[in-house]
Image: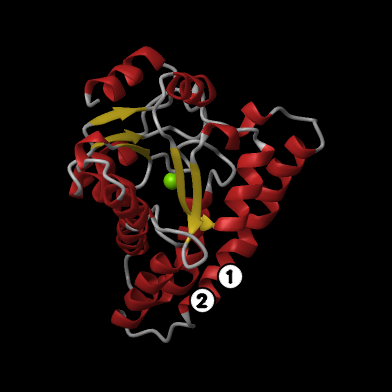
Amino acid sequence: MFDFDGTVALVRAGWMPAMLDMMMETLMPLGPDPAALRAEAEDYVARLTGKDTLFQMLAFVDHVRALGGSPAPAEEYRDEIFRRIAGRVADRLNAVADGSKPPESILVPGVRPFLEALRASGVAVYLASGTAHEHILYESGLLRISQYFDGIYGSAPTSLTKAELLDKLLSEGIAGEEIVAFGDGRVEIEVTKAVGGTAVGIATDEETCLTVDAKKRGWLIHAGADYIAPNFLRTAELLEVVAGIR
Ligand SMILES: [Mg+2]
């Protein structure tokens, strides 16, 4: 099971600072220490990464309320962060759509050869994301990676969550120990470990995607990741991880 944003694709790279900046506009007047407030927000934003964005905004609403503020409904904040990152997302996708940039410009390095090798080895491969289902379908098609997946699942309710996808696989007779997840979010790591699977944390530094981001690494290890990689360039070793559990 592959997560999409930050794992396979960089379509939404930079969303976390943008989300924290937006939250700080409301949090700043509610406490004396902006750095501490931002760190608190970053903690639940990171913890809920990989789930539908609404969960991050529900946690934010609770945070604002706990500080004595009067938050707007979580849905309004969700719509606002989507509006703020929409321009950057559209620019990246349009550059690929009009041919001025290759799909590889917004794919995590090495992911295509790795997916091709997994397909060649006969492993079933699934894509699961907390981003809206129709966006995941469009973007995976545009990036010419949809052919690698046996199933593509965006956010519920129109699709399955990551936990629901794993439940579906288990109900079809797959053992939890046979499942390997690749993801940059705590959610996919936790749900995979909960069923006895193996979790590879993709802690890519989103500037270059060549080094491990120390913060992401810490979050992913805390969530239970068995391995950490900055990208998929060490294909042979990653294939060994998959082969080792079969
Ligand atoms: Mg992700």
Q: Position of residue 183 (x, y in %)?
A: 37, 40
Q: Amino acid at mark 1?
A: Asp
* Residue at 53%, 46% in the rendered image: 14
Number of marks present in the image shown: 2
Image quarter of residue 197:
top left
Question: What label does residue 138 carry, if any?
Answer: none
* Residue at 32%, 15% in the rendered image: 237
Q: Which residue is mark 2?
A: 75
**Quarter of the rendering occupied by the C terminus:** top left
Which color scheme did the rendering employ for the protein? secondary structure
Q: Position of residue 224 (x, y in %)?
A: 19, 42
Name the side, left or right, on which 61 lies relative to 67: right
Q: Is mark 1 within 8 Å of ligand 1?
A: no
Q: Which residue is mark 1?
A: 79
Q: Are marks 2 and 1 in contact (CB under 8 Å)?
A: yes
Q: Amino acid at mark 2?
A: Glu
User: Residue lying farthest top?
Assistant: 236
- SS at circle 2: helix
Q: Position of residue 95 (x, y in %)?
A: 76, 37
Give above or below for 82 relative to 89.
Answer: below
**Quarter of the rendering occupied by the N terminus:** top left
The answer to whether any part of residue 5 appears in the image is: no
Q: Of 98 and 22, which appears nearest the observer? A: 98
* Residue at 70%, 54% in the rendered image: 87
